[in-house]
Amino acid sequence: MNTKEDVLKIGELWNEPVQFKVTVIKDGNCRAGHKTGEPFEFTWNTPEGLCGESFVGMYPILHSLRVMGDMRELGSLHRNVRVYNCPSRVIQFQIEATYRCNLCGKGLPIEDNEIIEHTLENPETQLYVRVCSNCFEQHKDKTLVW
Ligand SMILES: [Zn+2]
């Protein structure tokens, strides 16, 4: 029987673990009016003002970054950065992902292209969170519930 102290309700603490910063790095004749330097920062919801076709086109990259895909496999210098050309091959975007602790929201550092992270999981309920070292030490013996 679990006591209250043994249970970790992750739904109460949830922070989106992946943040995106998409920056226009090359502009041109663009129906969405994108200009070099224009930034878009977002986590789960779509960013207001970003060209819909470009968002759909870059979505596979966003999804890959969300599941910790390594962009070096696609020729990038950094695991968390990728350049994307819009479907009309006019606008160029730089997509950068940063990673946060699922529980406290603290940034997870990237050292030598490795994300410094720990995981907590409950195989019975298939709950899984990526956390910082502090949260890992604090919660490692608890049972995860939503
Ligand atoms: Zn944390």
Image (spheres, grey):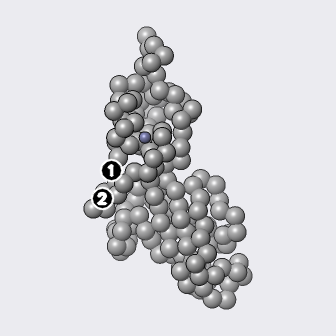
Residue hosting label 1: 116
Residue visible at 36% across and 64% down in the picture: 79
In the rendered structure, the answer to whether residue 125 lies left or right of residue 72 reads: right
Q: What percent of the width, then of the height, locates residue 20?
A: 53, 61
Q: What percent of the width, then of the height, locates residue 23?
A: 55, 73
In the rendered structure, the answer to whether residue 52 lies left or right of residue 99 reads: right
Q: What percent of the width, then of the height, locates residue 2?
A: 44, 14
**56 up-or-down from 130: above or below:** below
Q: Which label's residue is closer to the chain start, 2 or 1?
A: 2
Q: Bin the neighbour count of mark 1 within 10 Å (Cα to Cα): few under 14, some 14-19, many 20 and up.
A: some
Residue hosting label 2: 111
How many marks can you see?
2
Specify the quadrant that holds the C terminus: top right
Residue visible at 57% across and 55% down in the picture: 43
Q: Cβ–Cβ below 8 Å for labels 2 and 1?
A: yes
Residue visible at 71% across and 78% down in the picture: 32
**Splitting the image into four quadrants, where does ligand 1 fall?**
top left
Residue visible at 70% across and 69% down in the picture: 49
In the rendered structure, the answer to whether residue 105 lies left or right of residue 47 reads: left
Please identify the quarter of the rendering in which residue 47 is found. Answer: bottom right
Tag 2: residue type? Glu
Q: Is any atom of residue 136 visible in this view?
A: yes
